[in-house]
Amino acid sequence: MWRPLLALLLAASLRGCVAYEFEHEVWLKVDGSGTVNVTARPELWAAMKGLRGAQAADDDAALQSVRGLFESSGLRVRRVTLTHRGGRPYLFVSADFADVNRLAGTPAFPDLALSLRRDGENLRLDGRWARPAGLPDPPMDGRDGLMAVRFHLPSKVYAHRNAFAGVERGNIVGWRETVTEGLAGRPLEVGATMDRRSILLSTVGLFASAIAVAAVILAGVLFWVVRSGRRTHAAANP
């Protein structure tokens, strides 16, 4: 029995450890602000965002080109690093944005359009990733692997547009395709409907309500005890 169980645990761990060659990962807040992380090999930065400077032979120059791209797009850059995986270099950037609706069309996001708007009592996220035309193709040995767009949403998710693994860990949705498909121009259509209240706000509200109810119950118990004591005292001393 332990072998099937071990295989299941291994499969689950591998599913959560997928490595992407090109990835957007967005932490979104209900007010439209948030943080975006982008990780990609230098040749894919050039092929999908037009950033040829990412392929600079000098590491510092490559990092500075990524930083400059995001800062020129109005984002506050937190960190830019160069890492290696499987002998290949990857450029990573983490940056904060004030409004997800203003990212599309900026130098950092010619390939990604996102919008967040009210939809009745909920919030609706819509987006599309597509490679812009006219950018250089990477070499044939640089077209392997997967690319993804993933969102860490701030509130309960009611629906999504065919996220590849559904809703993960309560509030994560993602879409992916092969790098070859992305280079060929196949778009990724993304979308989700969520609560207008953040998970944190809902939790705080629930906690506050529980405290209020407990306080009312405690006050009621104390009132009953005091009143009962007075009646007992009055009965004992007519």
Image (spheres, rainbow, N blue to C red):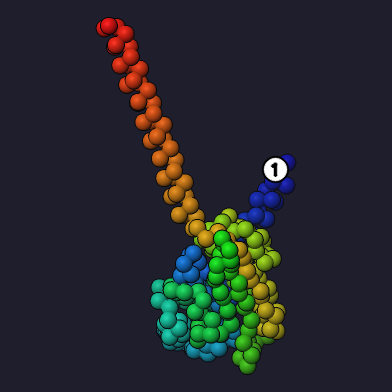
Q: Residue at x 56, y 65 (%)?
A: 123
Q: Which residue is mark 1?
A: 2
Q: Report the residue at 65% width, 55% height from top.
A: 12
Q: Which residue occupies 35% across, 26% down?
A: 222
In this image, 75 relative to 10: left or right? left
Q: Is residue 174 left or right of residue 227?
A: right
Q: Position of residue 114 (x, y in %)?
A: 56, 75
Rendering quarter of residue 124 = bottom right
Q: Position of residue 226 (x, y in %)?
A: 32, 21
Q: Say which quarter of the image contains residue 77.
A: bottom left
Residue 30 in percent (x, y) is at 49, 64
* Residue 45 vs residue 153, the one in the foreground: 153
Which residue: 65% across, 64% down?
Answer: 160
In x, y percent, where is residue 151?
56, 66
Residue 233 visible within the image? yes
Of 93 and 3, the residue lying toward us? 93
Would residue 236 appear left or right of 62 to someone viewing this image?
Answer: left
Residue 153 lies, with reference to residue 228, above or below; the image says: below
Identify which amino acid the numbered label 1 is placed on. Trp
Q: Where does the C terminus fall, quadrant-wise? A: top left
- The residue lying toward the viewer, choosing from 132 and 30, is 30
Which corner quadrant holds the N terminus? top right
Judged from the image, the secondary structure of the residue bearing numbered disc 1 is helix
